[in-house]
Amino acid sequence: MPKITLENGNTVEISQESYDALAEGIKKKFPQVGDGYYYVSGFGGVVRCLYRNDNADKRYQRHGNFFQTREEAEMYSLRIESLSWNYVPKNGEEFWIWGFDVDEAYHVNPTLLKYNVTTIKHKTKERCEEWGKKFGKAWEYLNK
């Protein structure tokens, strides 16, 4: 049986199950002051900072622009960039959307829709396929 030392200095034996539960609760939570994190700057670049629990850190967290890994921040940057590709079709105009389930473009006839398509829209199939190749993985990664 594992032993632990109490605050008063006494050592006691506890069950393995209790020890495992205690160890799980003690695990370091992210972020702690001094931890490195990443955010996406207003210019789209990924920046690494040390967490200080200051107003800037809290603002990045509040806005969802706060990542433990560079890869997460890079995917977020691509996703933000991808929004600028959105095409706003005229009333009744057909458009294309990216199908994440099959990694290909879908043609949409809005007169046949019974719901509003809330995704990035494209005027042409070629533009949609270009978008899918460049940004599709970033959207899938962040939707996990």
Image (cartoon, helix red, strand yellow):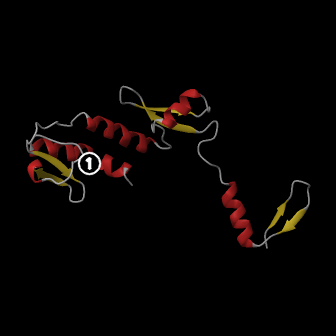
Q: Which quarter of the figure is the C terminus placed in?
A: bottom left
| Amino acid identity at mark 1 | Gly
Could you say which quadrant of the image residue 120 lies in? top left
Q: In this view, does 15 lie above or below 43?
A: below
Neighbourhood count class around disc 1 (C-alpha, 10 Å): few under 14, some 14–19, many 20 upward: many
Image point 63% across, 36% down: which residue? Answer: 34
Query: According to the image, label 1 marks what residue?
Result: 136
Q: In this view, does 72 lie to the left or right of 4?
A: left
Q: 14 or 119: nearer the eye?
A: 119
Image point 25% across, 46% down: which residue? Answer: 118
Q: Is residue 125 left or right of residue 136?
A: left
Q: 56 or 69: nearer the eye?
A: 56
Q: Is residue 57 above or below residue 96?
A: above
Residue 58 position within the rendered picture, expressed as x and y whole percent measured from the top left: 55, 33
Image point 72% across, 61% down: which residue? Answer: 22
Q: In this view, does 83 lie to the left or right of 5?
A: left
Q: Which quarter of the figure is the N terminus placed in?
A: bottom right
Number of callouts: 1
Q: Residue furthest front?
A: 114
Q: 69 or 85: nearer the eye?
A: 85
Residue 43 position within the rendered picture, expressed as x and y whole percent measured from the top left: 36, 26
Q: In this view, does 20 lie above or below 84?
A: below
Helix, strand or loop under label 1: helix
